[in-house]
Image: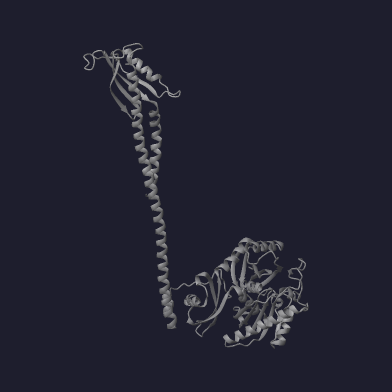
Amino acid sequence: MARKILCLDWDKHALRIVAARGGRRRLHLEDAHSHRIPAEVAADDPERMGRFIAQMLALHRIRTRQVVLDVPRDKAVITTLKLPPTPANELTAAVHFVAGRELSYPVDQAAVDYVVSERNEDGLAVEVLLAAVRQDVLNNLLETCRVAGLSPTNVGLRPYANGISVANLANTIQQQVLLIDVGPAVTEIDVVRGAHLTADQGAGTLGSGLVFSRSASVGVPFHGGELVSEDSRISSKAELSQMELIDEAHREVLDELVLEVKRTLQAFRATVGDPHIDQVLVAGGTGIEHALVDAIDRDLSLPADLFDPTARLGVNEHEAPQLRSFSACLGRAWTLAHPDLLELDFLHPKQPVEKHADLKRNLRIAGVAAAMVIVAAGAWVYNDFRQLRGERSELVEINKQLRADLVNYYELENLIQGKRTWEEASRMGIAIEHLLRLTEWAGDLNEPPPGGDQYKDYQKLLVTDFSFRESTGTVTLKLLCNDQETAQAFARRIAEYQIEDRQPYEVERLGSWQPATGSILDPKFKGQTDLTIKLVDLVAHNAGQKERDKAADKRIKELKRAGI
């Protein structure tokens, strides 16, 4: 059953969308749209770019949510690695090991994938094409898709996708092709080795055959024009391919592009054993492509033509100009239509499955094996040291917190003990103050009446003892009286006493009158009794103390549960 395929590709100025169906080695193109990115939308801003993509998909009523993307050449590292004959179960580990020396940044900060580009007669890999992209670049693409409401299933490499497109053209079989994908800001130049097909492979391909790739920062300004009418099945920028270069600025751009092609050929011939180029294909939608074909044919004496996938796709040849800028998107679509294709996928890169010890034993080069052991040991020691240093920092921070909590605990404990000491002293002060007042009143009853002889003995009441109960807030006085009325008068004075309209005392109990026969103090004291007085303020203080003690106990329990 044919599966839905949605491919996106964009640069600083244009978004390209391909919707297709693929399966059983066939690709059916449904829609291909190219849109100029508005000036206020930065292509590397996930929020704005994501919203712009969502708007364009809605415009064309494309509801497929799964999407494949690619990473441009200028944001990826591509290199060819020569390896000793390596079996498949050790290949990924070998590539990752060697990649550590090829990248300018740590391997763990990148997504690394590869394809086998050459095998020996025993089927063992001896050469791979390595591609790596920084994790932050990959995360930016994924975040853009999230904002657009899309779910990426594959993130490939634009030069590799271009190679797939070239390999699917009938006239490139068994040829070495130079593909120039002209962009408004960056031009990608790739060398692709055409597939060697067998009878049972039919129109399929074994891979892109990408052998060399570089990018050139040459800006090609648009001549103008926007989208053609949206009723067209395939829409693109205004038809620019037949426009002539009309000013000197465009001639300078053309000269720069030809110079970059020459530099690419020089670099390619310096790194490979078979430097010949059978033909040149020019892709892109800037309007300069026709003139570039003529310039390459004239200045480099190489057969050049425009990229035209219409025959392979089975669409009308008049749509070739609009499809010229879709080489990467179509390559990604062809990859998904052929599940047996070798491909790069930064979203799900191949991961080593073998231990380094196995890799060391089977790599045939002693120098690489020894270097691997040294690097692995150094990495182990460094990682162990870094882990221990991190644990020490965590323990130091925990210790600081414990020390701060302990200080808080002792400060709180000191406050609690101080509060209790103050309360005890306060209670004693309260009792002494009241006892002084009560004894003074008892003395007042013994004062002579007005006009009486002050030297005559008028003593009627004597306090012989007292007791103070802090818990109940009461004072009990033992009284000697000359009669019961004197004791009652003393009790009334205490009960009626007020301070600022408030009564500080309550007479709790006046004991029964008992004869005091044979008093050793004075025979005139006829009887004795007990008077119990309640100190109102102290009773109220004691009642509130229970709640305060509960609060203090609760805090202490919390500190203990916290381990302090």
Displayed quadrant of residue 545:
top left
Q: Name which quarter of the figure residue 164 lies in.
A: bottom right
Q: Would you say residue 494 is visible in this rendering?
A: yes
- Looking at the image, residue 447 lies above or below residue 319: above
Residue at image position (73%, 84%) is 294
Q: Position of residue 453 (x, y in %)?
A: 31, 12
Q: Nearer the viewer, residue 18 or 303?
A: 303
Q: Is residue 8 left or right of residue 101?
A: right
Residue 350 % position (x, y): 52, 72
Let me know if residue 174 appears in the view.
Answer: no
**Residue at position x 65%, y 83% in the image:** 177
User: How many badges with numbers are in the image?
Assistant: 0
Q: Quadrant of residue 434?
A: top left
Q: How are the colours assigned in the image?
A: one colour
Which x, y percent locates residue 166?
A: 65, 79
Looking at the image, residue 505 sits to the left or right of residue 188; the answer is left
Seen in the picture, residue 548 relative to 71 is either above or below; the reply is: above
Going by the image, does 247 lie left or right of 169? right
Q: Position of residue 244 (x, y in %)?
A: 78, 79
- 2 relative to 169, above or below: above
Nearer the observer, 122 or 158: 158
Quadrant the N terminus occupies: bottom right
- As rendered, which of 166 and 509 lies closer to the eye? 509
